[in-house]
Amino acid sequence: MKTVIAFSGKMGSGKSYFARQTLKFLRSKGRSARIISIAGKVKKVAATLTNTPISNFYCKKNKEWKYGITNGKLLQILGQGLFSLIDKRLWVDILIDKINRTHEDIIIVDDLRYIHEFDALNACTNIKLFHIHLISPFTRNDGRDTTHPSETECEKIPAMLTIVNNRSQIDIAQVLKSII
């Protein structure tokens, strides 16, 4: 059985930071772990579409693409648009397939955004899911729509633990001991 630690929260709440800290902690304890992002495939599609390096979609500095659309907004359009046209489980099904193919025992998901993603992961009989929701009093607007469902629906996902990220030192080891 795989263990999945999934972080949710609005943009700038610290999802990627906490995912990296969790990975670092787990590896220091000799655990087999890796980070897999739901948006990883969306970023690959965006990089192909814009003919730009995928690294442009991982940096905090949001670049404006053609037509007055920022990279962040393009990711929202592609992510939501494709799952609206094909199936809302498109991206989470790709994630689950990747989880099932990986050899690591612990998977860290750094971008849980939708209730249906949580439900799909939670329904997998081979996955033990821990959901941590991050709240930050700080905001970062990189051109994405803050009222977009990817920014608002994460607030509705039931969390095992909520962390207020006020940029002070949070001991990830203490947090993980309470759930793993």
Image (spheres, rainbow, N blue to C red):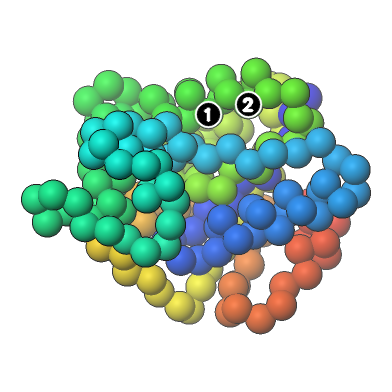
The residue drawn where x is 63% and y is 67% is 163
Residue 150 % position (x, y): 35, 50
Residue 103 visible in the displayed image: yes
In the picture, measured across the screen, residue 146 lies left or right of residue 139, that is left
Task: Say which residue label 1 marks.
Answer: 95
Give the CA separation, mark 2 to mark 1: 6 Å
Quarter location, residue 125: top right
The residue drawn where x is 42% and y is 32% is 41
Q: Residue furthest right?
A: 29
Q: Which mark is residue 158?
A: none
Quarter location, residue 51: top left
The reply to whether the C-beta atoms of the residues labelled 2 and 1 are less than 8 Å apart is yes
Residue 11 % position (x, y): 42, 61
In the picture, measured across the screen, residue 159 lies left or right of residue 80, that is right
Task: Say which residue label 2 marks.
Answer: 99
Residue 61 % position (x, y): 37, 64
Above or below residue 40? Residue 172 is: below
Identify the secondary structure beneath mark 2: helix
What type is the residue that disc 2 sits on? Ile
The quadrant of the image that shows the N terminus is: top right
Tell me if mark 1 has few (under 14), some (14-19) or many (20+) residues whose alpha carbon lies within 10 angstroms of its own. Answer: many
The residue drawn where x is 21% and y is 57% is 64
Residue 18 % position (x, y): 64, 59
The residue drawn where x is 55% and y is 57% is 15
Q: Residue furthest left?
A: 67
Identify the secondary structure beneath mark 1: helix
In the picture, measured across the screen, residue 157 lies left or right of residue 153, that is right
Closer-to-camera residue (104/9): 104
Above or below residue 61? Residue 7 is: above
Above or below residue 72? Residue 129 is: above
Tell me if mark 2 has few (under 14), some (14-19) or many (20+) residues whose alpha carbon lies within 10 angstroms of its own. Answer: many
